[in-house]
Image (cartoon, rainbow, N blue to C red):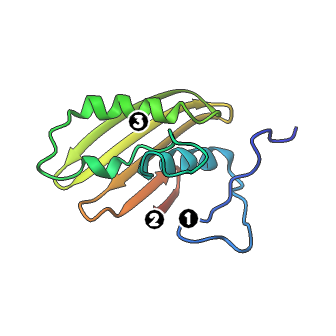
Amino acid sequence: MADVFGIDLMGLTDLDWEFTPVTNPRLGCAIAVGRRWISPNGSLFYSKTYGKNVRQYLGAANTVPAGLIATELEIEAEKDERVFKATVQVERVGSEMRVQGLLEATVGVVEFTLRVDELGKTTLSSGETTLTLP
């Protein structure tokens, strides 16, 4: 069966000139949602509602409750056409924010963790794979 959503390409830190496909569809879904969560709102010229920029919630001055952030990220994840339902937990640990995502998607159940530190370094972990996102 053909993948009606196309293929996901790595291209995490730069354009992947070899157009390497992500062979694990669950990892591809996690990367796509993780990118949504770190991209500024409206960052795609053809989709003004794309992105949430979780990095904006870092810092001692930020008092937005973790539950509200989780709800906003669930809504953002469900904008991806592969995702039927998203459950998100947000935890602040020192100067780091950990976001745990559980997605019910067309590719099955997807679990991943997004970590953002005070300098904006972002890592995505899903299964045995850990990636640094730009």
Residue at the right extreme, as displayed: 1
- Determine the CA span between mark 3 and mark 1: 20 Å
Q: Are marks 2 and 1 in contact (CB under 8 Å)?
A: yes
Image position of 81 with respect to 62: above or below? above
Between the residue at mark 3 and the residue at mark 2, the CA separation in whole angstroms equals 18 Å
Mark 1, residue position? 12
Earlier along the polypeptide chain: callout 2 or callout 1? Answer: 1
Give the amino acid type for the residue marked by disc 1 in the picture. Answer: Leu
Q: Is residue 28 left or right of residue 132?
A: right
Element on which disc 1 rests: loop
Residue 102 location, x and y as percent? Answer: 48, 34
Q: Residue at x 20, y 36 (%)?
A: 64
Kindly identify which residue carries mark 2: 134
Q: CA distance from mark 2 to mark 1?
A: 7 Å
Q: Which quadrant of the rendered structure holds the N terminus?
A: top right
Compared to residue 114, the image places residue 11 above or below, namely below
Residue 63 placement, left or right of 47: left
Residue 54 percent coordinates (x, y): 35, 47
- Judging by the rendered image, the residue that carries numbered circle 3 is 73
Q: Position of residue 53 (x, y in %)?
A: 38, 48
Mark 3 or 2, nearer chain start? 3
Q: Quadrant of the C terminus?
A: bottom left
How many numbered marks have been drawn onto this rendered protein structure? 3
Give the residue at x 74% y 41%: 5
What amino acid type is highlighted by mark number 2?
Pro
